[in-house]
Amino acid sequence: MVNFADGGGGAARAARRLHEALRAVGVDSRMRVRLKNGADPSVDAGTRLGALLRAGTGSVLVRLRWGGPAVARSANLLPSWWAQAINQSDADVVHLHWVGAETMSVEDIGRLRKPVVWTLHDMWAFCGTEHLADAGAHARWRRGYEHTDPPAGERGLDLDRLVWRRKRTAWRRPFLLVTPSRWLGECASASALLAGWEHRTIPNALDTSRFAPVDRAAARRALGLAADQPVLLFGGRHSDPNKGYDLLVAVLRELNRQESGRRAICLAFGEARPPAHDAGGAIRWLGRIGEDARLVSLYSAADVALVTSRLENFPQAATEAQACGCPVAAFSVGGVAETVAHGETGFLAAPFDAVALARGVAWLIGDAARHLALRARARERAERLWSPAVVTGAYLAAYAEAIAGSRGAI
């Protein structure tokens, strides 16, 4: 397993959870990361200072272009020297995950000679430097980053085009791609860079024995919440425009206007510093939460989990919530529509209609018997689709396929 870190962001959690699930069924899995946060001896890393220096240098390099959308970017220009070590290891399969922030250089990825499975957690593999990009019909990643089509508002060096061309030159041997959502797989297949590469859709693994409902009344008492108060939950960094914190505020204001007699409170987590405003007292900011047990308690206490992102591949806040029996209200964008069964385990609204999403939340909490049924169906769906037994079986088949394909290519 190769990933930038073993914890922190969504991709890191997904990679580590799969690593743990594979080891639990007897697979000799090891992780190689730049930034190690835990103490697991099966996770190998260099120095923390080295990882931060590489990532910091990379963030400076991407500032050679400015303006345009505020999205995460990685140029992966710095030599990494990991390909040689991996090629000389006894690993049967190399499983790439999120390798941005200078985890491996573009060229080093192309130098891997072992069977490779690459799980895409965002759009970077087929874009330039962008981890999320416009998905419209005229997106640059669909056509191939021509020098005549820089995005409006961007200035400086067209680093996206340069990095895309480096990828095209370096990645001559197709890998087996895995995407947690069908939507991202369709994007990869429609891209100028990865069209023709084999891909499979396998969701992120979630330990449904760990993420499971706990006593709702006790969870609310621990949080100081009234038993009958409508409680919503939001997980995401308010400083990231893609997470849609501004849309969350709009939804809450509309919901409390519609439901003037039952004022809802929203518990929010994901960033240490609270936002500059509190949406009229409707949001209680809880800061960063890293412990699974505390997350489980929050999901169990909430009536609805809100996902207001502008674009997502496979939001784990939605899968974690459902595993804990908490319905999800979200905008139907990207892969979000695949994580929520509309009317069965949650509600999907048209992007980015805050009024419609507020009405959806009101529908989810408006009838006690219906809400109870939604909670039960959410839990059942999580166990059926995202449990480790289901996901590890699919990945073992993908590994076997990658090994067989590599032998056939020799």
Image (cartoon, helix red, strand yellow):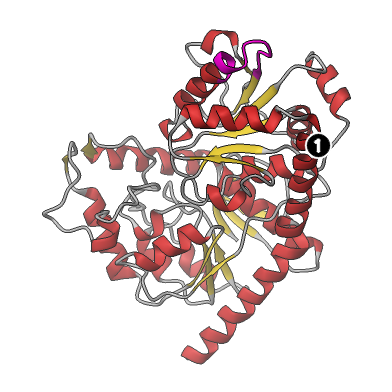
Q: Is residue 231 visible?
A: yes
Is residue 324 visible in the rendered structure shown here? Answer: no
In the picture provided, is 373 more to the left or to the right than 262?
right
Amino acid type assigned to the residue bearing label 1 in the image: Leu
Residue at image coords 62%, 23%: 268
Magenta region: 255-265
Question: Which of the 4 image quadrants contains residue 346?
Answer: top right
Report helix, strand or loop for mark 1. helix
Image quarter hosting the N terminus: bottom right
Residue where numbered disc 1 is placed: 372
Report if residue 124 lies within the magenta region. no
Q: Is residue 161 above or below residue 50?
A: below
Q: Position of residue 367 (x, y in %)?
A: 75, 30
Along the line of sight, which residue is nearer the eye, 115 or 346? 346
Number of dots carrying numbers? 1
Left or right: residue 114 versus residue 212 is left
Q: Looking at the image, which is closer to me, 57 or 137?
A: 137
What x and y, as percent, mark residue 111? 41, 71
276 sits left or right of 330 in the view? left
